[in-house]
Amino acid sequence: MDGFEVIAEGFARALQILLSGDQGILEITLLSLRVSLAATLLGAAFGIPIGFLVARKDFRGRSVVTTVINTLMGLPPVVVGLVVYLFLSVSGPLGFLRLLYTPEAMIIAQMILTFPVVCGITISSVLSLNPKLKETLVSLSAPPSWEARVLLNESKLGLITAIIAAFGAAISEVGAIMMVGGNLLGYTRALTTAIMLYTNMGEFATAIALGIILLLIAFGVNLFLTYLQMRSRVRRTT
Amino acid sequence: MDGFEVIAEGFARALQILLSGDQGILEITLLSLRVSLAATLLGAAFGIPIGFLVARKDFRGRSVVTTVINTLMGLPPVVVGLVVYLFLSVSGPLGFLRLLYTPEAMIIAQMILTFPVVCGITISSVLSLNPKLKETLVSLSAPPSWEARVLLNESKLGLITAIIAAFGAAISEVGAIMMVGGNLLGYTRALTTAIMLYTNMGEFATAIALGIILLLIAFGVNLFLTYLQMRSRVRRTT
Amino acid sequence: MSFLECRSISKSYDGKHALKDVTFEIEGGDLLSVVGPSGSGKTTLLRIIDGLEKADSGEVLLKGKKISGEPFLHRKMIGMVFQNPVLFNTTVFNNIAYSLKFRGEEGETIKKKVEEMLKLLRLHDLRGRNALTLSGGEAQRVALARALVYDPDLLLLDEPTANLDPYNVSIIEEVLQRSNREQGTTVIVITHNIFQAKRLAKNVAFLLEGELVEFSDSAAFFASPRDSKTLSFIRGEMVY
Amino acid sequence: MSFLECRSISKSYDGKHALKDVTFEIEGGDLLSVVGPSGSGKTTLLRIIDGLEKADSGEVLLKGKKISGEPFLHRKMIGMVFQNPVLFNTTVFNNIAYSLKFRGEEGETIKKKVEEMLKLLRLHDLRGRNALTLSGGEAQRVALARALVYDPDLLLLDEPTANLDPYNVSIIEEVLQRSNREQGTTVIVITHNIFQAKRLAKNVAFLLEGELVEFSDSAAFFASPRDSKTLSFIRGEMVY
Amino acid sequence: YVNKPAAPQRLVIATTTSTADTGLLDHLKPYFDNRFGANMTWLYLGTGQALEVASRGDADVLLVHDRAREEAFVSSGNGTLRVTVMYNDFVIVGPPNDPAGARGTNATEAMIRIARAGADGNAAFVSRGDNSGTEALEKRLWADAGVSASGTWYVSTGSGMAPTIRVANERGGYTISDRGSFYKLRSTMNATLSLVVLCENDTSLLNPYSIILLNSTKHPNINSDLATNFLLFMVSRQGQSLIGNFTVDGRQLFFPVYGNPESIGLPSENATVTYLNSLLKSKGLE
Ligand SMILES: Nc1ncnc2c1ncn2[C@@H]1O[C@H](COP(=O)(O)OP(=O)(O)OP(=O)(O)O)[C@@H](O)[C@H]1O
Ligand SMILES: Nc1ncnc2c1ncn2[C@@H]1O[C@H](COP(=O)(O)OP(=O)(O)OP(=O)(O)O)[C@@H](O)[C@H]1O
Ligand SMILES: [Mg+2]
Ligand SMILES: [Mg+2]
């Protein structure tokens, strides 16, 4: 059997598995979606307000805070995995919560990864708003609540970008969730960790099937982002 | 021993290991740097020229190509790992090269990850150049070679950003290099794969020491990027 | 007591004077044109009156009350149209409605008043368009509408017709004059076009390098200026 | 044979005429001012002459040779300064030197010619500054320098002094006149400032809604215009 | 602060890669879950890693295979009870052309030949390098052979059994695997796995698996009731016969041996067995 056939056969069997609606694969996919979505929403729940405040308020050390948040965007997932592991392990400070090797631990680890992404993009998109917008609001006597509302609306595209980018990063990530989730079958096994496992075990058809699902999600997310950005690129006629 | 002590002790031992200049740790770090750097440079060698051409030439399907490249930026590393694995494995189409579980395989996998990053950022930074620049060059009768030279110079910051972002992503990545590198001691064991292994083995001091090195590299890269961007943000006085 | 009074206002940026000891007053219902070469301080003066900028010294009094310096409570009765207005990323209708929402007006009132403005500035066909897709002249009209919709006592305009085509210029001039005459709105308009000043103004102020060189009624300003620099400016002999 | 000839040039965008059947010619060494309200087609005309835009119909002849339409080989003898010039992200010196490098000039020649330009436009102190940090007036002078440095036969300028302060305006006007008189450079300059047209031009062209309403020598244009629209324009009675 | 009770029905078994990779635990899971209303999950690590995780209290029960370290674990007070439940055996696998000539020799001899061929640049040996029970056995064999295994021919993967076999496969090297993992991988990989068994059926290659209950006074948060139930399930008649009838491609991979370790030459565990049997009875599990 020649090389490409192995791959072609893997794909054929992968499609069979996908079409048969395998229960295990569905479970893994749902877990991945649930964990990454929760991590993204939590990251956004903290990241957007904090990012907005950092961008709007003038305080000493603001540029330091911004640099720190931008730097955290480059946080290696395995380091996050290690640190969360140390904290959540039963002998660690938060061990009594018994969260290690649970989906909640995966959410915590990924939230640490999504927070700086959402926060950083929020800061830069609020900062890149035309400074005249703020002046216009002042000149029109907008009360503070309206000011925040209008400015957030103006940076809407940036915020959506932030959330989608964070979700895309979370769903593709493997290091952190492997370390704190443990890849337990039916419990913490996600798309990425399962792909690694099945590849190791030589179960290429399953690995490819999961890879196709992961690709569809990751690419779907990116395409949606591109579509949004194109749609909202208002053409100025002057 | 209470929870924080475990962590504190881990850090203390990690510092000891770092200061003692452990040979194994040095080797792992150098391998990580070598692989990620090579992958980044190869990704840039293809990504920059292709990105420039896509941005400058008007051809049918250009927006499709751009969307595809942007979408590829979201390629999950484990999927890349799986595909490269299938190709390089002995029974795969490129099996005769005997590259699986070598640093070269890791470079190939990471190159597939860095290429769209460099290419995509190059496209967007060349596209975001003021369209009047091109007109000005035409009006000044710049020959094509000079045109490319000037335009690449104008997007210099974008290109540097692209390269650094790609390197940062590569050095932090674990899924792809684990799958095609195999984490072989002294040969393909990199910072990220080693951190996962040592965490599993409960050798926290070593894991933390490697984590600190990885953080320093990842953050150093990001700080350098921030510095460059700040420095080159020329203030226009009008 | 005059409607608006500026008392020896000075302002400098990076040690360079933008305004030097500028003093003048206008009555309610006036229409003042401020002219002068680029960089003479026209925009700075308007921004100080609108409270967006703090003068280094001197004060601004509106109906006898000091409004410069401290938090600016009187801004609600002032409307300003910037040199290059920034509109909000929403419909034309909402852009104008915002000004009223900021003032806590009710839905019905808002609808009525915005419709009026759309009609006045011939924007009805554009009511549903995203404001960021408008042409320069249309955008300028929306900016004027959102400043006029809350019926300000004082309207400040910074080159409202620069780089516009005749159609847009004529609509804007017409609306300005109408609201000055019919609503009694006091208007201060900066223009680099002295013909426009001639057409519109009751009074003209001429700024040069931050100093108020001449302040007089329009007829006198163009027919018999007191200052030789004014003469050279209106004759076009001054290079600018 | 005249130096530059425009033969019934028409151009429309989205079905709207920007230029309608514009015909005129000028001799070498002329200094033509193009005036007209915003949107009247001034910039479009210059861009067609520079070959950046293709006319829908009509042709442009330079020294008797057709230069419109096909790939524009004669651009090397034309210099253009845009309405809002874009400079390159490098030093002032390099910005000017680029024009010569594009023409394959040698190091020594480049140095000599750039130095000349720096002196002429009083930019010597700024030679090492990044061009993106310049003020509007300084940037405009650099843009003029890089168009003049290769000694073009025809120099096209689109509102070169709009929004500049008097100091910058006077330098630019001086350099324009000098290179017109001393080098014999033919100049076409768009301006919205009719006083500037009066000061500089030998001939004046008046565009209105894409049509060439009047083309005559400066004295006649301002003293006894043939067309009533020209009169209303120069008297400032035309709203624009 | 009131301790949040752990998700009550989840059992985390820290185990070696072989029990997971072969699919044995997948085979047992539905019966156990059904019987105890539980959710049985497992972390598959090397035995060393599994013991490490358990000693920190991050797992509820151990299923491992490294006798020496198991005993050390219990005597250090981390575990309260250890019992042998099943066994299989290790095999030495390598490329079919067998450049070291290990085929048909005994284990110690095979190791000596592999090392010699390795030193000559004709062979490679791929080690788990992950502190696993398999690695512990490998170390014992090197010691018996009097060889210090190091050099470019000696590759350490730091990974589980399946990846290690795959590395050996790619590089045409030798490795030691439990029989179960090897046959399981061969059944999934078919022809793409070219390694063959070269050396087997040596008593030094026996591979007994034990279950260890953890010290619940040391780790009060672990789910010790469910852990005990798991142990009882595994030693019950049902558990033992489930182990025995688990097959891959028609081949039995694990052999139940509860109550009779003497049959494979191990010391008797009578005291423990008696205690467990009475527990089984009193709990009505048998
Ligand atoms: N924020 C600022 N920082 C520094 N200098 C400033 C600032 N705003 C204005 N200036 C300077 O103050 C002077 C007056 O500027 P101003 O904008 O008031 O002029 P203007 O009369 O409105 O000119 P134009 O006709 O070009 O709009 C100029 O020299 C300008 O460069
Ligand atoms: N690229 C374009 N696409 C669509 N319409 C255009 C384009 N360029 C110019 N126009 C239109 O053509 C007409 C003439 O424009 P042009 O820029 O030549 O005027 P102008 O006389 O230079 O005006 P200004 O004084 O404002 O610079 C205007 O109605 C303008 O909107
Ligand atoms: Mg101004
Ligand atoms: Mg123009």
Image (tube, coloured by chain):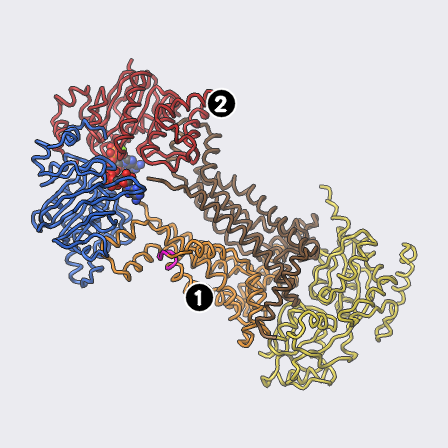
Chain colours: A brown, B orange, C red, D blue, E yellow
Q: Which residue is mark 1?
A: B42
C85 horizontally vs E219: left or right: left
Q: Is residue B54 magenta?
A: yes
Badge 2 marks a residue whose secondary structure is helix
Task: Provide the chain ID for the residue under circle 1.
Answer: B
Residue E254 coordinates in the image, percent (x, y): 79, 69
Tell me which chain the residue with mark 2 is part of.
C
Q: Which residue is located at x 13 percent, y 25 percent?
A: C227
**Dot 2 amino acid type:** Gly
Pointer 2 residue: C107
Q: Which image quadrant shows ligand 2?
A: top left
| Relative to B35, residue A230 above or below | above
Horizontal and vertical percent position of residue E29: 78, 58
Image: magenta residue range: B53-58
Residue at 64% from the left image edge and 83% from the top image edge: E115
Give SS at disc 1. Answer: helix
Q: Of residues C137 and C47, which is closer to you in this image?
A: C137
